Image: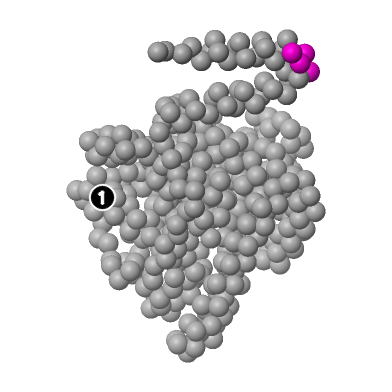
C-alpha cells in the first residue's frame, strides 16, 4: 500500500490548526517539518557515520626523530556508493582533508567533521594530526615539518582504501615512514584530488598544504582561520585567552558539553605533545625539544598571503569568519565595518590583500561572515558545513 505522506502531513497540521489555533501551529510546524524532512534525506543517501569516532595513532619517523601521529578517517559512503566508486576507479569527488585548530585532537568538532563527510560529494574526510616536529634539520621544525608528515598520514590512510593522491609530488627528498612503512608515489593506482579545509590554526595548515601539494589539492576552505593578521605569539595567546573567557561566560546559554569537549581536546593535545617532548629531549640529548610546543604557538601566528603561499591553482577558495569571534575578529583583521553584510568591495579587498595571485573577477573566492564565536564550527556545525561545501562546489547533489 502506498501512503501519500504529504496528504497525511497536511491532515495532521489541519487537525492541530483546528484544535489549538494559529499560535500553537507556529510551535508544531517546525517540529513536523524536521521530522518529515530528515527520513527523506537519510533514506535517499543511506550514508552514516559512527556515533563514537575511533582515532588511530602511528609512530612517524622523519628528520632523525620519531614522533606520534594521529588520524580519524570518516567514511560516510553507503555500500552502493563504495561499489560505484570501485567501478568508476575513483571517488565521486575530492577527498576532504581537515586540519584541526591548535592542539586539538582528530575527534574534536566531530559534529562538524562528520557533517562534512555526510554532505560532501566524496563522503570521506581524513583528519591528520601529529606532534610538533623538531628533528635535526631546523628547516622542518614546526609547521614546515607538518606539511610533510600530515601528507604522509593522508597517503597512508588512502592507500589502505586502494586510493592514491592524484599528482602527488614529494615536497622533500627526506624519507618519511608511517608505522615503519614508506610509501612511494603511486603511478597506476586509482586516485583522487584533495580539498584542504582548516579551522583556526588549521586554516594556516590548510593553506600551506594547498601550496605544498598544488598538483593534488584542487580547492581550499577555512573556518574562523588564523593567518590574516600581523601579530606575535604573545599577542595571539592573549587574544585566544580572551576569546576563551568570553566563550566560557556564554556557557549558561547552552552548548556546555560541546565547549567543554573542545577545551578538553585542546588540553589533551597540548599536554600530550609536551609530555612526549620530555623523553624525546632526554633520548636525543637535545633539550631544545622541550620548546617545540612554543614553536607550534609561533607558527599559529604566521601571516599568510600569496607572497608566501600561492593559491592561483585552486578552483575554489571558501573562507568563513564567525561574527562574534574576538580572536579572529573579521572587523579588526579584514576592515569589514558591517558584519551583517559583506559587499563586493570587501571581497575584492580581501582578494587583493591575501590572494593577489587569484583573479578577482573569476569568482574563485568567497568570503562569508556567519553567526558564532571561535567555536562556531562546533555550535553551528550544520550551517558551517553546508555553507562551506556549497561554496567549494562539494555539496552532494549540487
Residue at the image point whose x is 54% and y is 25% from the top: 37
Residue at the image point whose x is 77% and y is 58% from the top: 245
Examine the structure image and report whether residue 54 is included in the region drawn in magenta.
Answer: no
- Is 171 drawn above or below residue 64 in the view shown? above
The residue segment tinted magenta is: 19-23
Residue 81 position in % (x across, y down): 32, 35
Label 1: state its secondary structure.
Answer: loop
- Is 45 drawn above or below residue 191 in the view shown? above
Residue 309 position in % (x across, y down): 50, 52
Secondary structure predominantly adopted by residues drawn in magenta: helix
| Residue that mark 1 sits on | 162
Q: How is the image coloured?
A: one colour
10 Å crowding of disc 1: few (<14), some (14-19), many (20+): some
Residue 198 position in % (x across, y down): 53, 50
Q: Quadrant of the C terminus?
A: top left
- Is 343 drawn above or below residue 12 in the view shown? below
Q: How many marks?
A: 1
Residue at the image point whose x is 39% and y is 45% from the top: 75
Amino acid at each position: 500500500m502506498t501512503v501519500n505522506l504529504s496528504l497525511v502531513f497536511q491532515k495532521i497540521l489541519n487537525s492541530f490548526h483546528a484544535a489549538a489555533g494559529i499560535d500553537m501551529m507556529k510551535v508544531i510546524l517546525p517540529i513536523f517539518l524536521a521530522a518529515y524532512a530528515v527520513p527523506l534525506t537519510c533514506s535517499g543517501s543511506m550514508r552514516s557515520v559512527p556515533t563514537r569516532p575511533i582515532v588511530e595513532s602511528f609512530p612517524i619517523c622523519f628528520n632523525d626523530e620519531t614522533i606520534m601521529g594521529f588520524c580519524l578517517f570518516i567514511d560516510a559512503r553507503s555500500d552502493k556508493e563504495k561499489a560505484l566508486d570501485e567501478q568508476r576507479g575513483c571517488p565521486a569527488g575530492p577527498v576532504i582533508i581537515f586540519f584541526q585548530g591548535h592542539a586539538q585532537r582528530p575527534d574534536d568538532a566531530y559534529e562538524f567533521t562528520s557533517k562534512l563527510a555526510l554532505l560532501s560529494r566524496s563522503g570521506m574526510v581524513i583528519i591528520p594530526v601529529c606532534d610538533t616536529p623538531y628533528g635535526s634539520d631546523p628547516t622542518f621544525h614546526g609547521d614546515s615539518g607538518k606539511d610533510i608528515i600530515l601528507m604522509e598520514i593522508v597517503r597512508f590512510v588512502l592507500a589502505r582504501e586502494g586510493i592514491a593522491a592524484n599528482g602527488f609530488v614529494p615536497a622533500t627528498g627526506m624519507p618519511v615512514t608511517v608505522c615503519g612503512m614508506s610509501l612511494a608515489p603511486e603511478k597506476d593506482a586509482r586516485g583522487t584530488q584533495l580539498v584542504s579545509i582548516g579551522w583556526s590554526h588549521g586554516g594556516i595548515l590548510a593553506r600551506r598544504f594547498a601550496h605544498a601539494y598544488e598538483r593534488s589539492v584542487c580547492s581550499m576552505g577555512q573556518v574562523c582561520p588564523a593567518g590574516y593578521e600581523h601579530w606575535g605569539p604573545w599577542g595571539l595567546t592573549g587574544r585566544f585567552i580572551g576569546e576563551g573567557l568570553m566563550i566560557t561566560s556564554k556557557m549558561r546559554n547552552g552548548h556546555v558539553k560541546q565547549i567543554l569537549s573542545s577545551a578538553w581536546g585542546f588540553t589533551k593535545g597540548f599536554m600530550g605533545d609536551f609530555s612526549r617532548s620530555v623523553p624525546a629531549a632526554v633520548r636525543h640529548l637535545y633539550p631544545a625539544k622541550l620548546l617545540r610546543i612554543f614553536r607550534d604557538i609561533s607558527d599559529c601566528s604566521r601571516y599568510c598571503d600569496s607572497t608566501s603561499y600561492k593559491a592561483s591553482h585552486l578552483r575554489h577558495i571558501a573562507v568563513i569568519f564567525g561574527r562574534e569571534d574576538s580572536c579572529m575578529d573579521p572587523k579588526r583583521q579584514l576592515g569589514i565595518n558591517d558584519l551583517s553584510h559583506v559587499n563586493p568591495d570587501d571581497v575584492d579587498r580581501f582578494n587583493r590583500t591575501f590572494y593577489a595571485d587569484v583573479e578577482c573577477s573569476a569568482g574563485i573566492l568567497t568570503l562569508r561572515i556567519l553567526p558564532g564565536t571561535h567555536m562556531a564550527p562546533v555550535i553551528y556545525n550544520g550551517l558551517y558545513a553546508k555553507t562551506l561545501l556549497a561554496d567549494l562546489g562539494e555539496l552532494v547533489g549540487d
